[in-house]
C-alpha cells in the first residue's frame, strides 16, 4: 500500500531543496552518520539545523531522514507505534511534499521508517533503515550532569554509574523499574540510550537486519547501530533484564507477545488493551484475527489508513 | 613472650618484612604563574604508614595532596606508585584510563566536605556500592551485602542503607564517604581535612574510627590537616609546610615534642591546651 | 652480661626561636650503657635533663650529636640517626617506654590501650586483651574501669593503665619515666615486682624514680646525670 505523492514537487517548489535541507548540510549529516556506523553506539556531534518544527517534535530524526532519503525510497513514519497520530502524519506529509517520495504504513514495504518511541512488531529486513527521534541521547546524564565528564566516561568505558541507576531502582522498587529508555551496551563497548522506546523493544535491536540511526536535534547528536550488531540490555546477575508482559491479548486483533497500549473507553472504568503498532494490528485483522472486543464482526479501522489521509 | 616468639607471632600474623615504599614523591613542584603552590617536595610513603601534612591555610598542603593524588598535574617532579604487581609506575606517565582505574580501586580520596565525595541523590547503599559496580560487580545481592557490611563498619545502621546522604548528619556523611572509599580495599587513601567542620565529639568518634580502620586494613594514608592533635592521633610521620615548602619532617611525636624550625615551634606553641 | 644499649657523647640543646633564638643547653657528653638483666636509674636533681635523656633514647627528642646504639633484631642501630620508619620499628620490637602521663585516645577502652603494643606486633586481639586483663588484675585496677576510656580516670588509675601498656610486651629495653609517682604503697610494690621479673627475663631497664624506696629496691646502679650537665661539659 504505497501512496505516491504528486509528481516532482521539488521542481515546482523552487525555494525548497530536495528533502528540505541543502546539500552541504546533508553531506555534513551523512558524515556524522557514517562515523556513527563506524563506531556503533558512539554519540557523534553534528551541526543540527533549525527545522520547521519545534524541538521535541523529531527534529533530529527528520534531519537524519532528510540526509539519507532518495527519490526511490518509501517512507513510513510512526509515533508510539501509530501511523495516524499528528506527529507521524505531519512528518510523512513533510517528506511527501519536500522530497516527493512514496509513503506507506506497511512495515515491510518501507525502506526508511522514522519512529518516535517504538520499533515495529514486524521484524525488519535487510535494506531497511530505522530512524529514531531522540530527546536526550546521553544515558549517563541522569547521574552526571557534566558533559565533559560523561564524554570522558564513555571514552574510558567507565560505566559503573549505569548500574548505580539500576541499583537504585531495585533498592526502591524491589526490581528494575526502568521501563523505557532502558540502557544498552552496543557491541560490548558503548553504553547507549535507545531513546524512550519501551524496554519491550530492546531485544529487537539486537542483531537486527536493519540499519538503526538515532538523531537528537536539540542535543545535536547522531548515533547508530549497524545491522547484525550485538545490543545487550544492562542488568544484574540476580536481577536479569526482562521485558514487559501483558496479561491479555490485543482486544482488537487478539495478538500476544506484542506491546499493548491501554485505551480508556468511557468514564465508568471501561478500558481495553490494543496493539500499539497500528499496522501490525490492522494486518492481523485483515488476515481474519479477531480480538475479544470485536467478536466476529469486521470493525472500524479495517480499511487501509492511507486512504483516509487528507490530501495535501 | 620471648623475642623469637614475637618474630613467630609476626610471621603468623602475616606481616611481611616490608621492602619497598608504596609511594615515592620526588622534587614535586607546582607553580601558579609566579606564585608557588608547592616546591621541591620529596618523600617516601611505606605500606601501612600514615603521613600527616600540616601547615596553616595557604601553606600549599592541599596543592601537594592534589599533585600526589593525580588530581592536579605538577609543574615538575615525579610521583611513583608501586602497583599490586610490585612494579613501580610514574602516575603521570600512565594512560588516563589506568590512572582513573587506580583511583577508584587501589586508592581512596576523602574530601573535607562530604558533598564533594558523595552522590547526594542516590542511596547510601549505592554510594558504597558504586566502586564495586565500577570494577564489574554485577550481583545486586552481593553489592548490597557489601554495602551493609561497610555501613556497619563505619557505624551507620543497616536501616539507613536506602536513605540518601542528604538526610544524614555531617558526621554520618563523612563516615559514609569513608565507607565508599574503602569498599574496594584500597592500599592508599588520601584525606583532606577529614575532620574539618565537625563538632569536637563527632570529630573524636571519626578519628577513633579512622585509627581502627587504618590499623585493621593496614592502609597507607596521606592526611592533610591544620589540626596538630589530629596529626598526633592519626599519623606516624609528619611534614610541616610553609609557603609551599617543607619546613620540617620526621616522626610525628618528635616533631611535635621537639620542634626545631622556628615555624614549627610557633605552630606547636599555638595549640590550645584543654 | 650482654650490653643492649650504649649511649655515647650524646648532646642536646633546645633553641627557642620564640624567644629570639636563645639556646638552652640540656645535656652534653651523655655516655653510659645498659646491660641485660639490670636496672639502671638516672639520678640527679630535677631539671638536670633526666627525662630528656629517656626521650632521646626513645627517639622522641632529637640529638644534636652523639650516638645511641641499640641491639635491634640482632644488629646495632643508632637511634639518634635512624629514619622515622626505623625508630617506629625499634619502638615496636626493641625499646619500650612507660611515660609519666597517659596520652588518652578518645573512645578507646583502658583494656585496648594496654593491649595495643601487642596488637601492633600482630598478636590476636583476644590474646592481647587477656594479657592486659592479667596485668590490670595484678595492678589492682578496678574491673569496672577496664572497658572505659581512661581520659576520665584519676592520676593513679591512668598511671596503672600506662604501666600495663609498657610491661605487656617483651621489649629487651624498657624505659621508665616516674612510673610510680602517683601510686600508693601497695601498687608501688607491684611495680617493683614487675621490674624484678623483667630483669629476671633479661631485659635492660632504665628508669627515673623520685621515690627512694622504689629506687633502692630496683636500682642495680645509678647514672648521675649532673655529670652530663651541659654547662659542665662546656667548661
Image (tube, helix red, strand yellow):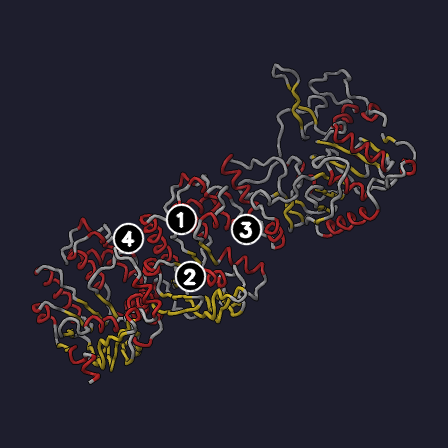
Q: CA distance from mark 1 to mark 3?
A: 24 Å
Is there CB contact under 8 Å for labels 4 and 3?
Answer: no
Q: Give the vertical position of A301 relative to C199 (above or below).
A: above
Q: Nearer the viewer, residue B1 or C195?
A: C195
The quarter of the displayed image where residue C93 is located: bottom left
Quadrant, the N terminus of chain C: bottom left
Residue C78: x percent and y percent? 30, 78
The residue shown at (51%, 43%) is B140
Residue A65: x percent and y percent? 79, 41
Residue A257: x percent and y percent? 67, 30
Q: Which residue is mark 3?
A: B136
Which residue lies most toward the front here? C20
Q: Nearer the viewer, mark 2 or mark 3?
A: 2
Q: Give the vertical position of B85 relative to C38 (above or below).
A: above
Mark sitting on residue B175: 1
Mark sitting on residue B222: 2
Chain letter for mark 3: B
Mark 4 lies on a secondary structure that is loop
Q: CA distance from mark 2 to mark 3?
A: 28 Å
Q: Earlier in the sequence, mark 2 or mark 3?
A: 3
Q: Nearer the viewer, mark 4 or mark 3?
A: 4
Residue B9 showing in the rendered view: yes
Chain letter for mark 2: B
Q: Earlier in the sequence, mark 1 or mark 3?
A: 3
Q: Nearer the viewer, mark 1 or mark 3?
A: 1
Q: Earlier in the sequence, mark 1 or mark 2?
A: 1
Q: Which residue is mark 4?
A: C106
Can marks 2 and 3 be said to lie on one chain? Answer: yes
Image check: C59 left or right of A270? left
Is there CB contact under 8 Å for labels 1 and 3?
Answer: no
Amino acid at each position: 500500500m504505497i501512496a505516491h505523492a504528486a509528481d516532482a514537487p521539488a521542481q515546482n517548489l523552487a525555494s525548497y531543496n530536495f528533502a528540505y535541507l541543502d546539500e552541504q548540510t546533508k553531506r555534513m549529516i551523512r558524515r556524522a552518520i557514517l562515523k556513527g556506523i563506524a563506531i556503533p553506539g558512539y554519540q557523534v556531534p553534528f551541526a543540527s539545523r533549525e527545522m520547521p518544527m519545534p524541538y521535541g517534535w523529531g527534529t533530529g530524526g527528520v534531519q537524519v531522514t532528510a540526509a539519507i532519503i532518495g527519490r526511490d525510497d518509501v517512507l513510513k513514519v510512526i509515533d508510539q507505534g501509530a501511523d495516524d497520530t499528528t506527529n507521524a502524519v505531519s512528518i510523512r506529509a513533510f517528506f511527501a511534499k519536500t522530497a516527493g517520495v512514496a509513503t506507506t504504513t506497511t512495515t515491510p514495504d518501507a525502506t526508511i521508517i522514522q519512529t518516535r518511541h517504538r520499533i515495529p512488531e514486524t521484524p525488519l529486513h535487510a535494506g531497511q533503515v530505522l530512524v529514531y527521534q531522540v530527546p536526550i541521547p546521553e544515558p549517563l546524564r541522569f547521574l552526571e550532569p557534566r558533559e565533559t565528564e560523561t564524554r570522558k566516561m564513555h571514552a574510558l568505558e567507565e560505566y559503573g554509574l549505569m548500574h548505580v541507576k539500576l541499583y537504585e531502582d531495585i533498592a526502591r522498587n524491589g526490581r528494575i523499574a526502568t521501563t523505557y529508555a532502558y540502557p544498552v551496551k552496543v557491541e560490548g563497548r558503548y553504553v547507549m540510550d535507545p531513546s524512550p522506546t519501551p524496554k519491550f523493544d530492546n531485544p529487537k535491536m539486537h542483531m537486527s537486519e536493519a540499519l538503526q540511526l538515532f538523531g537528537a536535534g536539540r542535543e545535536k547528536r547522531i548515533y547508530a547501530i549497524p545491522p547484525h550488531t550485538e545490543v545487550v540490555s544492562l542488568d544484574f546477575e540476580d536481577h536479569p533484564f526482562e521485558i514487559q508482559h501483558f496479561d491479555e491479548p490485543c482486544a482488537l486483533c487478539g495478538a500476544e507477545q506484542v506491546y499493548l497500549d491501554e485505551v480508556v473507553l468511557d468514564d465508568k472504568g471501561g478500558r481495553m488493551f490494543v496493539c500499539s503498532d497500528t499496522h501490525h494490528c490492522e494486518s492481523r485483522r485483515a488476515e481474519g484475527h479477531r480480538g475479544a472486543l470485536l467478536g466476529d464482526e469486521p470493525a472500524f479501522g479495517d480499511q487501509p489508513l492511507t486512504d483516509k489521509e487528507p490530501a495535501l | 613472650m620471648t623475642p623469637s616468639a614475637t618474630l613467630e607471632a609476626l610471621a603468623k600474623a602475616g606481616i611481611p618484612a616490608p621492602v619497598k615504599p608504596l609511594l615515592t614523591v620526588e622534587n614535586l613542584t607546582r607553580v601558579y604563574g609566579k606564585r608557588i603552590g608547592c616546591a621541591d617536595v620529596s618523600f617516601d610513603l611505606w605500606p601501612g604508614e600514615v603521613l600527616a601534612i600540616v601547615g596553616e591555610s595557604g601553606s600549599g598542603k592541599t596543592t601537594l595532596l592534589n599533585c600526589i593524588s593525580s588530581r592536579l598535574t605538577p609543574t615538575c617532579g615525579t610521583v611513583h606508585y608501586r602497583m599490586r604487581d610490585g612494579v613501580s609506575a610514574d602516575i603521570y606517565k600512565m594512560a588516563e584510563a589506568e590512572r582513573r582505574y587506580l583511583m577508584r580501586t587501589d586508592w581512596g580520596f576523602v574530601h573535607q566536605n562530604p558533598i564533594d565525595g558523595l552522590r547526594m541523590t542516590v542511596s547510601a547503599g549505592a554510594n558504597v556500592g558504586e566502586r564495586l559496580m565500577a570494577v564489574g560487580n554485577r550481583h545486586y545481592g552481593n553489592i548490597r551485602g557489601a554495602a551493609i557490611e561497610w555501613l556497619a563498619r563505619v557505624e551507620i545502621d543497616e536501616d539507613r542503607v536506602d536513605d540518601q546522604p542528604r538526610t544524614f548528619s555531617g558526621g554520618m556523611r563523612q563516615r559514609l564517604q569513608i565507607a565508599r572509599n574503602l569498599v574496594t580495599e584500597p592500599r592508599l587513601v588520601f584525606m583532606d581535612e577529614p575532620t574539618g567542620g565537625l563538632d569536637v565529639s563527632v570529630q573524636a568518634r571519626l578519628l577513633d574510627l579512622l585509627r581502627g580502620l587504618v590499623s585493621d586494613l593496614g592502609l597507607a594514608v596521606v592526611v592533610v590537616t591544620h589540626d596538630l592533635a589530629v596529626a598526633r592521633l592519626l599519623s606516624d610521620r609528619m611534614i610541616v609546610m610553609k609557603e609551599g615548602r617543607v619546613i620540617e619532617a620526621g616522626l610525628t611525636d618528635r616533631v611535635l615534642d621537639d620542634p626545631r624550625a622556628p615555624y614549627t615551634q610557633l605552630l606547636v606553641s599555638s595549640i590550645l591546651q584543654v | 652480661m650482654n650490653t643492649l644499649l650504649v649511649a655515647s657523647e650524646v648532646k642536646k640543646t633546645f633553641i627557642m626561636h620564640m624567644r629570639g633564638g636563645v639556646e638552652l643547653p640540656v645535656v652534653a657528653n651523655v655516655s653510659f650503657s645498659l646491660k641485660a638483666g639490670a636496672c639502671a636509674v638516672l639520678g640527679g636533681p630535677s631539671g638536670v635533663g633526666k627525662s630528656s635523656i629517656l626521650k632521646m633514647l626513645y627517639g622522641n627528642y632529637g640529638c644534636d650529636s652523639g650516638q645511641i646504639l641499640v641491639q635491634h633484631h640482632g644488629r646495632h642501630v643508632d637511634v639518634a640517626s635512624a629514619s622515622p620508619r626505623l625508630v617506629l620499628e625499634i619502638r615496636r620490637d626493641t625499646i619500650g617506654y612507660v611515660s609519666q602521663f597517659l596520652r588518652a585516645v578518645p573512645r578507646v577502652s583502658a583494656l585496648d590501650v594496654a593491649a595495643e603494643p601487642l596488637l601492633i606486633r600482630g598478636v590476636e586481639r583476644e590474646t592481647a586483651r587477656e594479657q592486659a586483663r592479667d596485668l590490670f588484675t595484678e595492678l589492682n585496677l578496678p574491673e569496672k574501669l577496664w572497658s572505659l576510656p581512661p581520659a576520665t580516670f584519676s592520676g593513679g588509675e591512668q598511671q596503672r593503665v600506662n604501666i600495663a601498656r609498657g610491661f605487656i610486651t617483651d621489649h629487651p629495653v624498657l624505659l621508665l619515666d616516674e612510673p610510680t609517682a602517683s601510686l600508693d604503697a601497695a601498687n608501688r610494690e607491684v611495680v617493683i615486682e614487675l621490674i624484678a621479673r623483667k630483669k629476671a627475663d633479661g631485659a635492660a631497664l632504665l628508669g627515673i624514680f623520685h621515690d627512694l624506696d622504689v629506687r633502692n629496691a630496683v636500682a642495680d646502679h645509678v647514672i648521675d646525670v649532673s655529670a652530663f650537665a651541659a654547662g659542665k661539659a662546656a667548661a
